[in-house]
Image: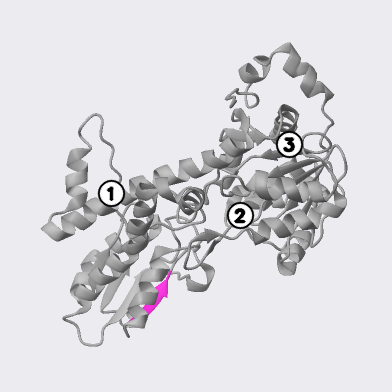
Amino acid sequence: MTSSEPFAGDAAARTGADDETARTDSALEPIEEVVVVGTGFVGLPLALLLADRGKRVVGVDIDQTLVRAINDGTLNLDEDDLQALLETDAVERNLEARTEPTDADAFVVSVPTPLTEPNKSPDLSALEDALASIRPYLEPGDLVNVESTVPPLTCAETVVPALEDADLEPGAEIQLAHSPERILPGNVFDELVTNDRIIGGIDDRSRRRAAMLYEPFLEGAVYYTDLLSAELCKLVENTYRDVNVALANEFALIGEELDVDASEVIDLANNHPRVDVLQPGIGVGGHCLPIDPWFLNEVDPEHTNLITTARRINDKMPTVAARKVRRALAPLADPTVVALGAAYKPGVDDRRNSPAERIVADLRADGYRVRHYDRHVDELAYDDLRSVLEHEAADVVVQLVSHEETTAALEEHRSWLADAGIELLQFGVENPIDP
């Protein structure tokens, strides 16, 4: 049976634990040494926070360049709070990056679960490799905590057998928990500290010990459940958002067919006290929303019709946006297009599954001359927008991602653009959702 009991995060939640729970927690072995397998967008911030709070942390990654950059302090992070953590004395003392694990009290697996193409099935090879890498170092009493977002039943059908192969029985000799991450690129530090945590465990002891892992920095509450419910919870959260984005995008497609401004109609509809429709955009990107709903389809295709339809709607929106650009370019002879924005959402440099990059690729495949810039992406960055447009002799400028600075610069130069005969197309001046 699932329990939603808050445990950590504030004094009220902690003091609300009953005497039996308190005795159980006091008997749990302390967690002083942690191995984090996967030091990417999720694993590295966790490793930094734990090291800053005095835990001995080993960050494990197959990328030797990243390992060296962490150890020699040359890694440049795109969030000020995380960069500041990386440069603290505590992190310098307590965090070591390696390409292989070592002994520890707790092992956190934080590796990606991509999709295979074209069948949209989850690829669990990174998780399987991570489990194989820690197997020689596991001992009775250790905690294995999976942070990776995974399909339902992964813990039961993949993680448990891997631990049993190490001759350790989960729940009896070794603790097993699943606590899927809930972070937002661009605001990772705050989200790690303040967001509530869902912790599923193979037994109560595993859940409680996993909560101890986050207690040094967590301000949000912790809610306990079983492994399968924790797996499903993360997928439900992201699928809910994806379906709502798809609804707004389908309204936009209807508006295009009827020659009506769907954004204006949505604004009017949202005056209803029980309606809150999002604004349409060019598609959905990032590491969660384009992927996680397919995990539900993998385990139950019969009952995921709405979910997979929403995925397909959002997946085709870059094609719709590219079609709109082509229409604007049709009257022009051999135009030069400057496309602004390569990240998957405003305010970050994250290009994973970026709809903007798909649009640029489609236009270039059609033979259009497209110059691509993004002020947040190092290899595409620029200092002054007007200088870029003059240098490229732009005929059309297309804003694909509504970075605040880009929107402000385009507004500042709107009169100059008109005088220079440069056509301006803007998509998603406000991204309606942060995947």
| Amino acid type of the residue tagged 2 in the rendering | Phe
Q: CA distance from mark 3 to mark 2?
A: 19 Å
Q: Which residues are magenta?
A: 368-373
Count residues near mark 3 (Cα–Cα under 10 Å), then give few for <14, some for 14-19, many for 20+. Answer: many
Question: Considering the numbered disc 1 on the image, is that residue within a helix, a strand or a loop?
Answer: helix
* Front residue of this view, candidates 102 and 9: 102
The reply, left or right, for residue 35 in relation to residue 383 is right
Secondary structure at numbered mark 3: helix
Locate residue 28, reporting x and y percent: 82, 27
Most extreme residue toward the top is: 19
Nearest the viewer among 165 and 248 is 165
Which residue lies under the disc numbered 2? 41
What's under tag 3, amino acid-wise? Leu
- The numbered dot on residue 369 is none
Residue where numbered disc 1 is placed: 248
Residues tagged 2 and 1 counted as in contact (Cβ below 8 A): no
